[in-house]
Image: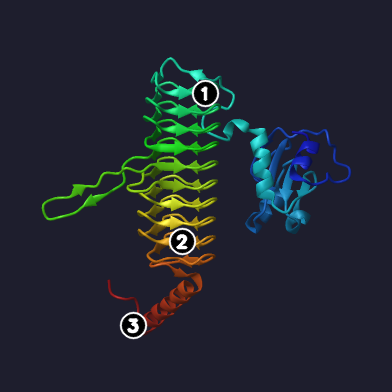
Amino acid sequence: MSLAGIAEAAGVALPEGADPDAVVTGVASLESAGPDDLAYMDNARYGDALEATRARVCLVSKRFAARVPEGTLALVTRDPYRVYATLLGRLYPDALRPGSLFAAAGISPGAHVHPEARLEDGVRVDPGAVVGPGAEIGSGTVIGPGAVVGPGVCIGRDSAIGAGATLTNALVGNRVIIHPGARIGQDGFGFAMGAGGHLKVPQIGRAIIQDDVEIGANTTIDRGASRDTVIGEGTKIDNLVQIAHNVVIGRHCVIVSGVGISGSTTLEDYVVLGGQVGVVGHLRIGMGSQIAGSSNVNRDVPPGSRWGGTPAKPVRAWFRELTTLARLAERGADKGGEPEA
């Protein structure tokens, strides 16, 4: 990209004296960037790396602009990381979703598409993939190698299903990214327990994945038992997440790796769950709430809350508990030395 194109995409003016026709050919970290690279910086921890960078262009906030070295063009923007992501997508469009954006559409000779499946023009089905009877797939969608699209599954347009992923009992929207190994729409864990054995409860709902959702590798999303499991528009789910039956997740939520959400829980819009959060069943986490990593949520969370700990509670209360425990431990050590094992 030319410097003029970068400045236009960033929504800023080029500094006086900059050559608008100069070209950036790649991106790199501050430490490894060379004279043809673009870098960004928005964290004070990397101040020394910024001062030593050799990048041609660096996206920075106003706070750090004075630390950009001579020879590096500083483009000052309010949100360097977001602008960097936009530029990265333009420089490397093939990395925006699994499967090359530029490979030809069509059904590989090594794929199996049932004659009763319906595929729009422009669908690509890679070797080893299976598309079942009654499945529907929209134009521009890529079905990766070894992926399975089960009977009756519907997938919208411009979506990407990664290698080895499986979809059953699912309705998937447009521009959805499902990474390799994900499992969507299998039975939830439902049993009527009793002394004579555990009776399986038939799961009859679907998994609904709305537009612009991204689902990480080896994540599992169970179909609903008596109602649909729903993942709302724009939600981003990391790798190795378990979402149980009947869960409803709102729009633009962020769920980090290792999270487990038990059945029939509802997350309202814009909720963030940190890594390894556990949520028990039949709860509601209010709109815009944030739960700190490794926390365990066992009661409803009001909208706009920031909670953490086990059991999770408002962060101020959690920090007070941690501080109190640390002081008590210090007093005990002062009186009697190290506690016995």
Depicted 80 relative to depicted 32: above or below: below
x, y percentage for residue 271?
Answer: 51, 57
The reply to whether residue 92 is in sight is yes
* Marker disc for residue 120: 1
Depicted 88 relative to depicted 255: above or below: above
Identify the residue shown where x is 73% and y is 56%: 64
x, y percentage for residue 52?
Answer: 71, 49
Q: Are marks 3 and 1 in contact (CB under 8 Å)?
A: no
Residue nearest the viewer, comparing 310 with 61? 310
Q: Residues within 10 Å of mark 2 (few under 14, many from 20)?
A: many
Q: Report the Cα–Cα distance between label 2 and label 1.
A: 39 Å
Depicted 163 relative to depicted 74: above or below: above
* Marker disc for residue 231: none
Describe the element under mark 1 as helix, strand or loop. loop
* Marker disc for residue 336: 3
Q: Look at label 3 and name its amino acid.
A: Gly
Residue 103: name its quadrant. Answer: top right
Kindly report which numbered mark, 2 or 3, lies closer to the viewer in this rendering. 2
Describe the element under mark 3 as helix, strand or loop. helix
Mark 2 highlights which residue?
285
Q: Look at label 1 and name its amino acid.
A: Glu
Describe the element under mark 2 as helix, strand or loop. strand
Residue 26: name its quadrant. Answer: top right
Q: Report the Cα–Cα distance between label 3 and label 1.
A: 75 Å
Q: Report the Cα–Cα distance between label 2 and label 3.
A: 44 Å
